[in-house]
Amino acid sequence: MEHIQTDNLSRAFFALADPTRRAMLVRLAAGEATVSELMAPFPLSQPTISRHLKVLEEAGLVEQGRDAQRRPRRLTATALSEVDGWISALRTQWASRYDKLDTLLSTLNGDKDDD
Amino acid sequence: MTTDLRFEFVPNKRDFTITVKREFNAGRQLVWDCHTKAEYLDQWFAPKPLTTQTKHMDFREGGYWHYAMITPDNEKFWNRLDYKTITPIDGYTAKDGFCDETGAVNPDLPGSDWTVTFADAGRRTLVTTLVQYGSAEKLQAAVDMGLEGGLASTMERLDELLVGLNG
């Protein structure tokens, strides 16, 4: 398989491929949020949430807001367009999911033919 | 083998719906079974590299499917699909949502409503999934505010990436 170039894009793509991170982006699309606010909806530990945040920050999707004490996170200007990249990531998910269904169906059909 | 199977993925940004259409090289009953039985769903539903694990499946109106998508390093993302209407083997409607391991749905996270239909297409089966997002207004507001400029080019670049990944 070809190695995929363009670091930022690959990172953004990787970041968007995860459902928790997508949900975090959706939350941030509604306005900035602190780490604990971001954590609240998830049954996940703070280190896990922080790891997800780090991925989003490295992808250039999320940055720290101005308030130095609360240290809220917000979407970067370019990230807002990445929310739509999220749609592209979803498309990849559906394509991948259905490729697996093709494999299963051909297995099941094969079983039937063997009868 | 799969290259000539129809696949459409059409986001409608206006009402924040996505319509996914896909043909499968199998009869409608089998394709239906693969969508509605846990032992089959577990074999395909999570996209690569994730795997699917069903915790609870009760495929009837008012019942639900509770499952985890599991990453290669064993992190689990719990989801729940609540079935609203079922018309074998034509289609079903359901509500998709994030939940925890106990199945408790998180109302703060964006769920979506699914309308899935199954139709004969010659010897194949066409599955159409209409995904409607509950958080349309909020998300759309953010999209409208920030996206006008950078959106098209980002989409194009991601499209190129996807072509690269698929090829």
Image: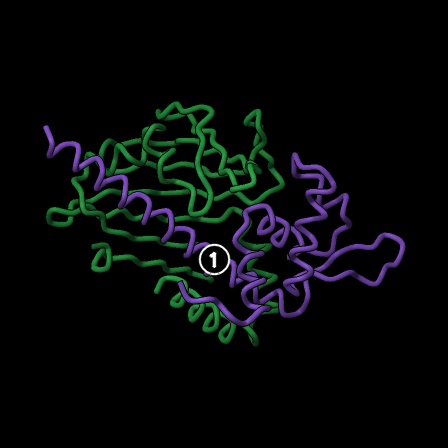
Chain colours: A purple, B green
Q: Residue at x 47, y 31 (%)?
A: B67
| Residue B96 placement (x, y as % from top left) | 47, 39
| Residue closest to the eye, A65 or A58 | A58
Q: Residue at x 51, y 35 (%)?
A: B79
- Check the picture and name the quadrant holding the N terminus of chain B: bottom left
| Residue A107 placement (x, y as % from top left) | 22, 38
Task: Give neighbour class at mark 1: few <14, some 14-19, many 20+ (Cα, 10 Å).
Answer: many
Q: Residue at x 69, y 60 (%)?
A: A57
Quadrant in which residue A42 is drawn: top right
| Residue closest to the eye, A75 or B112 | A75
Position of B82 with respect to A41 (left or right) is left
| Residue B88 placement (x, y as % from top left) | 24, 31
Position of B36 with respect to A11 (left or right) is left
Q: Which residue is mark 1?
A: A89
**Three-letter amino acid code of the residue under disc 1:** Ala
| Residue A34 placement (x, y as % from top left) | 78, 50
| Residue closest to the eye, B32 or A10 | A10
